[in-house]
Image (tube, rainbow, N blue to C red):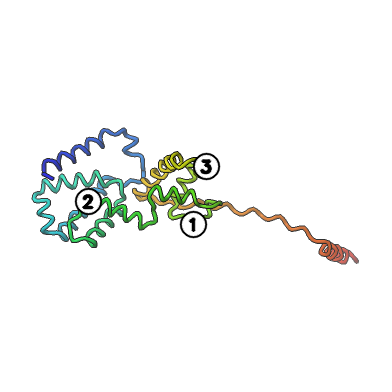
Amino acid sequence: MSKKSISDIADQIESLGKSLPEPARASHSTQPPREEYVEAINQIFALFRLNYHNQYYAAYPDAEQVKQVKKLWLESLNKYSVRILLQAAKSAIEKSEYLPTLSRMHEQCLAQLNESGLPDAHQAYLQACQAPSPKASQSWSHPIVYLAGRDTGWFTLANEPEAKAFKAFEQHYQKYLERVLQGEAFEMPALPAPEPQAQKPLDKEAQLKLLAKLKASTQL
């Protein structure tokens, strides 16, 4: 890709971000400030420069090109948390002798999520459909699978055809997933306290023994 085309793509992404309505751009209060992402991208490129010295300078021969590539990566990868970005960069360096591309970084970020027990949307949907009741007491691969199922409605998952139910489930799951990508943690809701069991009635023999004991205790 030429230097000019990289700059053009980066500028297009920035323009697209500015054109979004304000609520869509700031929908998650858990997202770290932009400065943290800038610092993370700078750290990642510093690691790449140290580990892929010759490849790095062959791919990015001048400072202006590095600036434009960083800008592109920043706008493309900021849906992940800073922690995931740094872990993904470390994993990419450990697993490959070649300088990672932007596409490869996305793959590594998703791999970090999979290691955390996050299934893809369809796997999560199947898990939600197959979980027996009571749902909250089951073992879930991740709490957001349960939460997305709850928000979709267990009746819907059990009775609607997959073409309809999965679409509804996927919308809820994606919203929770985006919050996880930004570093928000989720836990399963606390189970309600079990209702006290009714006392089992005494059989006839036990009743007679209790009556005899009460009579004995009332005698002077």
> How far apart in space, not on screen, are marks 3 and 1 (Cα)?
22 Å
Where's residue 157, x and y in %?
49, 44
- The answer to which of marks 3 and 1 sits earlier in the sequence is 1
Residue at the disc numbered 3: 159
| Amino acid on which disc 3 is placed | Asn
Q: Which mark is residue 139?
A: 1
Which is more foreground, mark 3 or mark 1?
Answer: 3
The answer to whether marks 3 and 1 mark residues whose Cβ atoms lie closer than 8 Å is no
> Is 100 displayed left or right of 54 in the figure?
right
Q: Quadrant of the C terminus?
A: bottom right
In the rendered image, which quarter is residue 68 located in?
A: top left
- Badge 2 marks a residue whose secondary structure is helix
> Is 78 displayed left or right of 69 in the figure?
right
In the rendered image, which quarter is residue 198 located in?
A: bottom right
> How far apart in space, not on screen, are marks 1 and 2 (Cα)?
37 Å
Q: Which mark is residue 97?
A: none
Q: Residue at x 24, y 56 (%)?
A: 89
Closer to us: 209 or 122: 122
